[in-house]
Amino acid sequence: MNVVEIDNITKTFGRVRAVDDLSLNVPEGSIYGFIGPNGSGKTTTLRMIMNIFYPDSGKIRIFGEKMHGATSDRIGYLPEERGMYKKMKVRDLLRFYGELKSGRRVNKEVDYWLDRLDLSDWADKKIETLSKGMGQKVQFISTVVSHPELIILDEPFTGLDPVNVEAIKNAVLELRSQGATVIFSTHDMNVAEKMCDFIFMIFKGKKVLDGTLVSIQDKYGSDTLRVRTEGGISKLQNLDGVDKITDFGQLQELRIAQENDHQKILSEIMSRTRVYSFDMAKPTLYDIFLRIAGPEAKEETDA
Amino acid sequence: MLVLMPVLMGGSAIAMYLLRGQVDTTDKRVVVLDRSGVVADMLLKAVEERNKASVYDKETGKKIQPAYILDVVEPDEKDPQAQRLQLSDRIRVGDLHAFLEIGQNVLYPKGEQSTFRIKYHAKNAAMDNVRNWLNNTINPYLRKVRLVDSGLEESKANEIMTWLQVEAMGLLSVDDETGEIQEARRTSEEEAIFVPIVVFFLMFMMVMMGAMPLLQSTMEEKTQRIAEVLLGSLKPHEFMAGKVLGGLAVSLTGALVYVIGGVFFLGRLGLNDIIPYHVIPWFFAFLVLEIVMVGSWLAALGSTCNDPKDAQNLTFPAMFPVFFPMFVFMPVLMEPTSGFATWLSFFPPFTPMLMLIRKAAPAGIPAWQPWVGLVGVILFTALAIWAGGRIFRVGILMQGGAPKLSNMIKWTIRG
């Protein structure tokens, strides 16, 4: 069953088409990653799922039905910009948000999550006294404290240190294991690759990628040759059949142009310098992202 | 807030009341230049009597009023200006309080006007109790002298000069228990305006307490992105309704405390007669509608603001339905049945406050008028909720750009 079914939705703001004829299905119990450059339409799509914005055309069904008042109670939403009453105490705020969603007391859940994210000592402190990372964790708790079946997180890892990123990641995985469906947007391709069952990329309001990581990578094939050589980047210039070279210092990544022979290119490199190691790899999500939305893609579009 | 607000608002009135007995008891020395030759002696006698009767409290012996000391000085006919200047200088250095010039023809004013003028020179002559006393002493005396000169006996002249005050009285009524006719109660001007003013300012206070904060709080919830979190749980109209109902609850709680407290307090003082029981239901009906109407409007305006400056700029237009009645409440109170007051009180944004003050005024208004006003306000409040809700729905998520009337109209029409 699909928890979210988006069918040809479009949303415009003035003359800007923020989302353009987008369709998407989010299966129950999955983690779905939304990626895309800034201003590509991620947040607008999430807001339409939340019924905060209404699509100009198209349909959105949540839990198999059109969104209505009670549906939003089954969804936890963490907006991109954090919003908390600064003068409220942490525990009071979490109770307020949790009870607003669930309509019942959530004292136990609040205590559990405060303990789980190492915030128990801050429970009676005012929000304004928290650091940015702590505030982010409190906002995360407010999203999940009511046990929502669908959790929508708009850039949940922004501004967090690695320890807290790990804590939130583990919490998300725990919620998924308990049956929740999770949608989150992120700019961190590593997180998306490791966590998401499905990845969806939106660019200029249009869907450009949708599927599992493997299916997306398969689409691009094994077109990447990683080499470690004695001569380094200086010996790899002007190789025929190479579209792009990314230099990592000790290691270089060569993107092989379509219908070119890897062996031939490797032989050419070996004739120029000593090769310590090499391997053929699928492109990373980061690389795919740049191919679609980076300066290189812009140059191609402009050309 | 419940305590502080009336303390601040009523503070000045209470201070004026408490300080009304605070008088500068420093003796006032006044030089009299009597060119008529008929007033000075009378003034000396009158001031002696006045000082004897009024300067000291008869029971405590405490000085409660300044003594007036009159120095009758011969007018300098050769150089009157030099004499005036010299007296003025004495006033400037504090040696004198004032000097009085009495024209030579004051008894029978005719001829050139300068000959029958009475001039009082002081630092603050216009607002001076000594001048009032002189006015009220010299004029009756001159009238009496004229009557006596015309052949009347002095006692007869005194009778003629007797001044009787027209007393303000209330209406007679029948005692419900005994069936006897109750004597009318004497009323004062202060008492007549006390009830309408209290009711009016209580309404103003409740609006400031319950509705006014909605502008700021909505703006804060928007700019701090709390609105988006809440909109994940609520629909915009539910969000706005919650805010308005919260403001209403604050106002009603405050109003109940004050009304119950006021009725109890006045009852204890034996002033049941002045409690306007017939106005209380109207007060609450109009208060509910006023808070919902103004609250919806303020929440909608708050949703269009992006920073505190925006909210500050919108405060006056937002509160106009409350401020305008403040500007006109005295004319409406004095003439509650005039065309101006009547028509203005039928204009729905002003109806709650102006109809209430008219209803509370002693003169009263036709019974149908508050009902018609109430219907108008109900309809207008419904319109305010509808338009406010549509503006709020769009404005609360719209970032950037100053609030514009054109946008609000567009959002109201298109939603």
Image (spheres, helix red, strand yellow):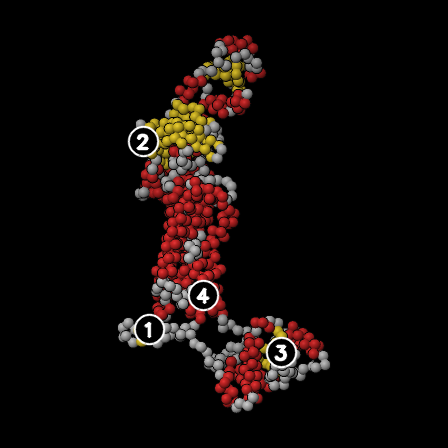
- Give the CA separation, mark 3 to mark 2: 97 Å
Report how far apart the C-alphas of labels 2 and 1 lie in the structure: 73 Å
Q: Chain of mark 3?
A: B
Residue that badge 2 annotates:
A64
> What residue is pinned by disc 4?
B335
Q: Contact (CB < 8 A) between labels 3 and 2?
A: no
- Which mark is first along the chain, 4 or 1? 1
| Numbered mark located on residue B173 in the image | 1
Of the two numbered discs 3 and 4 in the rendering, the one whose residue sits closer to the viewer: 4
Q: Are marks 3 and 4 on the same chain?
A: yes
Tell me the SS state at disc 2.
Answer: loop
- Labelled disc at residue A134: none
Same subunit: marks 4 and 2: no
**Mark closer to the chain start, 3 or 4:** 3
Between B294 and A194, the one lying in front of the other is B294
Identify the image quadrant of residue B32. bottom right
**Which element type, helix, strand or loop, lies under badge 3?**
loop
| Residues at marks 4 and 2, CA–CA distance in whole angstroms | 66 Å
**Label 2 Cα neighbours within 10 Å, binned few <14 / some 14-19 / many ≥20:** few
- Residue at x-position 43% and y-position 32%: A11
Q: Amino acid at mark 2?
A: Gly
Dot 4: element: loop
| Quadrant in which the C terminus of chain A appears | top right
Residue B117: give its label: 3
Classed neighbour count for the residue bearing mark 1: other residues with Cα under 10 Å, few (<14), some (14–19), many (≥20)? few
Q: Amino acid at mark 3?
A: Arg
Q: Which of the image's four quarters has the N terminus of chain A?
A: top left
Residue at the spot x=40%, y=37% of the render? A52
